[in-house]
Amino acid sequence: EVQLVESGGGLVQAGGSLRLSCAASGITFDDANIGWFRQAPGKSREGVACISMTDGLTHYGDSVKGRFTLSTDNAKNTMYLQMDSLKPEDTAIYYCAAEGSGYGCYVGDFNSWGQGTQVTVSS
């Protein structure tokens, strides 16, 4: 059984930084695509950053390029999302996902999800 557990969310002022963690069990990160998504109130879940095993690339959403960085520690089976220069519009619940396929960062391409962690950016 695949389990994903996020941590690291919280309240931060605009311009600040946070690092989210996602501890995984039941999978290894080389098996399939992994990534981070977010969902703001009243909006659909959107891709933030995903690693595609299909093309070997990390895909970032346009709104976070240059500010967010996805990384992994395969020894710890943990992935991270470093978020810098945070903006109020980054406020959302952030989810990690695994067992993905294809290219890019699309919700429908992933089969396993964490429970989410809240990130709130104050202005």
Image: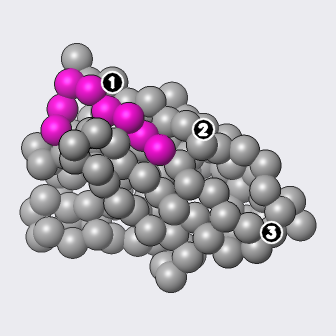
Three-letter code, disc 1:
Gln
Using the numbered discs, state the Cα–Cα distance from disc 2 to disc 3 in whole angstroms: 18 Å
Q: What is the x, y in percent for residue 36?
A: 43, 52
Magenta highlight on residue 23: yes
Ranked by sequence position, the earlier of labels 1 and 2 is: 1
- Whether pointer 1 and pointer 2 mark residues with C-beta atoms closer than 8 Å, the reply is no
Task: Please tell me which of labels 2 and 3 falls first in the chain.
Answer: 3
User: Residues under labels 1 and 3: Cα distance?
Assistant: 32 Å
Q: Which mark is residue 3?
A: 1
If the image is split into quadrants, where does the C terminus sit? bottom right
Residue segment shown in magenta: 21-28
Residue receiving disc 3: 14
Q: Residues within 10 Å of mark 3 (few under 14, many from 20)?
A: some
Tally the marks: 3
- In the displayed orientation, state which residue is furthest to the front: 75
Q: Main secondary structure of the magenta part?
A: strand
Tell me the SS state at disc 2.
Answer: strand
- Would you say residue 12 sits in the magenta stretch? no
Q: Earlier in the sequence, mark 1 or mark 3?
A: 1
Amino acid identity at mark 3: Ala
Is 103 on the left or on the right of 81, as rendered?
A: left
The three-letter code of the residue at mark 2 reads Thr
Residue 116 x, y percent position in the rendering:
55, 35
